[in-house]
C-alpha cells in the first residue's frame, strides 16, 4: 500500500513523489472551476428571473411547459451525453444555428432599414460589378504590367464607387424595393452559395442546383409572402440569411451520415413550445408577465417602465460594430501579417519591431476609459467628427480592441507550421504567394475566432461611450453614422441610475439579458469555428 502513496525518488533529488499532492491539486482546480461556473450560472438565473418573471405565471402554465418542453429536453440531452456525443454536438449546432441566423437576419434588416437603403446597396453592387469587369479585362490584356495592374486595381473601384451610385440614384425610374433586393442581395448570395457547394462537394452540378434553389425560393416570396402576412422584403432576408445556412448544415449532416439523430433536437424543442402554447391556451392558463418580449425589442426608450424599449440602442450597437469591422479588423490583421511574415528580426529594425510588439501587448491591458479619452482628443477635438456619433464610437472602441485583434491574429499566423512555408518556397512561390495561398488560409480560422471574441469585447464596453459623449437616451434610431447614437451597454447604464424599482429590476434585467444573449452567441460561434477546424486538422 505504501507504494501507492509514495512511488519513488525524483531522479536522484532525494524527494519522494506523492500522489496525494497531485490528487489534492487536481481536486482543488476542479473545485475552483465548478465554483466559477456555479457563480456565473446563479448570476444568470438571478437576472433571467427578473427579466422573464416565471413565477408570475399560473402553476398550470409552468407544469404544462415542464411536461411538453423541459422534460423532453432533459431526456434528449441525457441521451446525447451518454450514448451519442456526436449527435449531441449536432443537436447543439442545429438548435443554435437558426437562432444565430435569425439574429443575423435582424442585423441585416436593421442595416437596410437605417444604414444603407436597398437602392444605395444596388448602386454599390452595380459599381463594384463594373469595376470588377474593367479590372479583369485589363488583367487579361496587360498581363505583364504588374505596376499598372496595381494602379488599376485601386483606382477603378474608387472612381466607380464615386460616380456610378449617384448616376443610378438619379434615374427617374427604379425597380421596386423587392426587385432591387432580389438583384442586389439575393443573386450575389445565391452565387456564393453555389460556389461554396461546388468547392465543398467538388461537383459543379450540385453548385448550380444550390444557387438555383436559393434564387427560386427567395423569388417565390414576391407572390407568396403577402399571402402569409409578411412583406417580400422580410421573406427574402429570412430565406437568404436563415433558411439557406440551416439547409446547408442539415444537408451536410445527412450526407455525412453521423450524428443525424441530433437533427431531431430542434424539432423536439419547437414541437414542445407549440404544444405548450396550444395546451395553455386551451386550458386558459396565464403565462408570465415578461419584461423581455417582442415589444421591448422593437420599442424606443420611455419614462414609463412598461413602455420602455431597446430598439434604438440595438441599432446603435449594430452601426458601431459595422464601423469596427471596416476600420479595426483590416488594420489589425494587416499589422499581424506584417509583424509575423515581413518584419525583420535582426539588426536595428528588428529591435524596433520587438519594441512595437511589446507596446502592443501593453496596450491590450490599458483600461478602456483611457481609450475613451484618446477618442475624445483624436476624433472629436482634433478630427472634428462630432461627439456621440456612431462613427466616433466605432473608431474609439476599434482602437480599444485593435491590440487584441493584432495579438490573436499573430498567434493564429504563428501557429502555421514553418514546413508549409518552406515547401511553398521550394516550389518557386514568392513571399506574397506563400502568405496569400498557404499561410492565410491555414490561419484564417484562428483569425476569425480572435476577431469574433474581440467583437464580443467591443459590444459590451461602456466607459469609452461615456467619454465620447454618447447620449444617455436616444428615442429615435440613428439614420446615419454621423447621427447621435446610444449602444446597448450605454442604455443599460442609464437604466441602472433610475430611481423607479421597475427600471432597476425589470427593464434593466431585460436589457442585460439581451446583451448577454448576443455576447454568448458570438462567443459560441467563435468556439464552434475553432473546434470545427481543429477537427479538420
Image: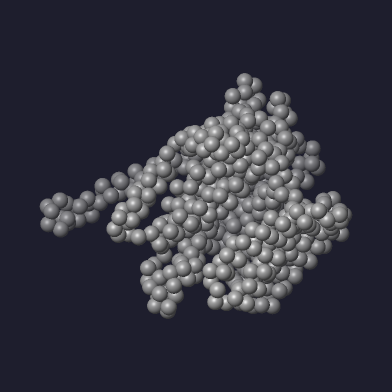
In the picture, residue 518 is in which quadrant? top right
Image coordinates of residue 113 in percent, x first then y, are: 74, 46
Seen from the viewer's position, the closer of residues 258 and 499 is: 499
Name the residue at 64% across, 69% down: 135
Name the residue at 42% across, 79% down: 427
Q: Is residue 493 left or right of residue 483?
A: left
Image coordinates of residue 93 in percent, x first then y, are: 59, 57
Image coordinates of residue 374 in percent, x first then y, are: 49, 36
Name the residue at 28% across, 49% down: 22
Answer whether residue 476 is visible to the viewer in this image.
yes
Instruction: State the scheme by which the image is colored.
Output: one colour
Image coordinates of residue 98 in percent, x first then y, are: 66, 55
In the picture, residue 492 is in which quadrant? top right
Q: Quadrant of the N terminus?
A: bottom left
In the picture, residue 512 is in which quadrant? top right
Q: Is residue 293 left or right of residue 524?
A: right
Seen from the viewer's position, the closer of residues 56 and 66 is: 56
6 relative to 129, above or below: above
417 relative to 371, above or below: below
Answer whether residue 450 is visible to the viewer in this image.
no
Name the residue at 71% across, 69% down: 211
Seen from the viewer's position, the closer of residues 442 and 9 is: 442
Amino acid at each position: 500500500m505504501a507504494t501507492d502513496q509514495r512511488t519513488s525518488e525524483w531522479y536522484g533529488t532525494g524527494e519522494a513523489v506523492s500522489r496525494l499532492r497531485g490528487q489534492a491539486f487536481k481536486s482543488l482546480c476542479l473545485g475552483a472551476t465548478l465554483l466559477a461556473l456555479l457563480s456565473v450560472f446563479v448570476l444568470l438565473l438571478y437576472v433571467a428571473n427578473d427579466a422573464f418573471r416565471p413565477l408570475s405565471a399560473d402553476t398550470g402554465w409552468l407544469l404544462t411547459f415542464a411536461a411538453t418542453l423541459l422534460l423532453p429536453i432533459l431526456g434528449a440531452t441525457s441521451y446525447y451525453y451518454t450514448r451519442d456525443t456526436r449527435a449531441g454536438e449536432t443537436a447543439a449546432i442545429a438548435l443554435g444555428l437558426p437562432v444565430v441566423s435569425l439574429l443575423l437576419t435582424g442585423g441585416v434588416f436593421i442595416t437596410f432599414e437605417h444604414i444603407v437603403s436597398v437602392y444605395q446597396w444596388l448602386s454599390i453592387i452595380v459599381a463594384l460589378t463594373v469595376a470588377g469587369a474593367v479590372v479583369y479585362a485589363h488583367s487579361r490584356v496587360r498581363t505583364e504590367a504588374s505596376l499598372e495592374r496595381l494602379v488599376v486595381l485601386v483606382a477603378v473601384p474608387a472612381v466607380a464607387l464615386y460616380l456610378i451610385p449617384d448616376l443610378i440614384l438619379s434615374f427617374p425610374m427604379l425597380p421596386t424595393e423587392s426587385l432591387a433586393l432580389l438583384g442586389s442581395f439575393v443573386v450575389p448570395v445565391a452565387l456564393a452559395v453555389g460556389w461554396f457547394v461546388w468547392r465543398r462537394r467538388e461537383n459543379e452540378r450540385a453548385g448550380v442546383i444550390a444557387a438555383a434553389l436559393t434564387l427560386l425560393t427567395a423569388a417565390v416570396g414576391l407572390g407568396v409572402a403577402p399571402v402569409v402576412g409578411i412583406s417580400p422584403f422580410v421573406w427574402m432576408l429570412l430565406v437568404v440569411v436563415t433558411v439557406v445556412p440551416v439547409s446547408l448544415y442539415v444537408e451536410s449532416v445527412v450526407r455525412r451520415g453521423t450524428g443525424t439523430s441530433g437533427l431531431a433536437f430542434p424539432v423536439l424543442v419547437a414541437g414542445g413550445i407549440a404544444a405548450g402554447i396550444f395546451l395553455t391556451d386551451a386550458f386558459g392558463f396565464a403565462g408570465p408577465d415578461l419584461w423581455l418580449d417582442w415589444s421591448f425589442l422593437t420599442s424606443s426608450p420611455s419614462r414609463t417602465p412598461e413602455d420602455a424599449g431597446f430598439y434604438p440602442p440595438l441599432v446603435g450597437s449594430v452601426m458601431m460594430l459595422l464601423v469596427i469591422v471596416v476600420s479595426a479588423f483590416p488594420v489589425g490583421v494587416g499589422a499581424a501579417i506584417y509583424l509575423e511574415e515581413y518584419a525583420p528580426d535582426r539588426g536595428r529594425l528588428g529591435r524596433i519591431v520587438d519594441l512595437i510588439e511589446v507596446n502592443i501587448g501593453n496596450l491590450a491591458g490599458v483600461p478602456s476609459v483611457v481609450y475613451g479619452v484618446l477618442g475624445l482628443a483624436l476624433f472629436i477635438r482634433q478630427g472634428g467628427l462630432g461627439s456621440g456619433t456612431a462613427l466616433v464610437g466605432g473608431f474609439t472602441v476599434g482602437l480599444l480592441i485593435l491590440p487584441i485583434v493584432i495579438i490573436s491574429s499573430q498567434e493564429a499566423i504563428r501557429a502555421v507550421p514553418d514546413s508549409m512555408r518552406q515547401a511553398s518556397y521550394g516550389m518557386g512561390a514568392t513571399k506574397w504567394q506563400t502568405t496569400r495561398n498557404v499561410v492565410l488560409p491555414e490561419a484564417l480560422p484562428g483569425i476569425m475566432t480572435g476577431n469574433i471574441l474581440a467583437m464580443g469585447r467591443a459590444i459590451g464596453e461602456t466607459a469609452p461611450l461615456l467619454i465620447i459623449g454618447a447620449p444617455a437616451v436616444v428615442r429615435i434610431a440613428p439614420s446615419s453614422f454621423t447621427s447621435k447614437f446610444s449602444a446597448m451597454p450605454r442604455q443599460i447604464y442609464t437604466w441602472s441610475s433610475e430611481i423607479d424599482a421597475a427600471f432597476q429590476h425589470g427593464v434593466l434585467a431585460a436589457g442585460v439579458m439581451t446583451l448577454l444573449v448576443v455576447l454568448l452567441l458570438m462567443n459560441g460561434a467563435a468556439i464552434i469555428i475553432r473546434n470545427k477546424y481543429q477537427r479538420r486538422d
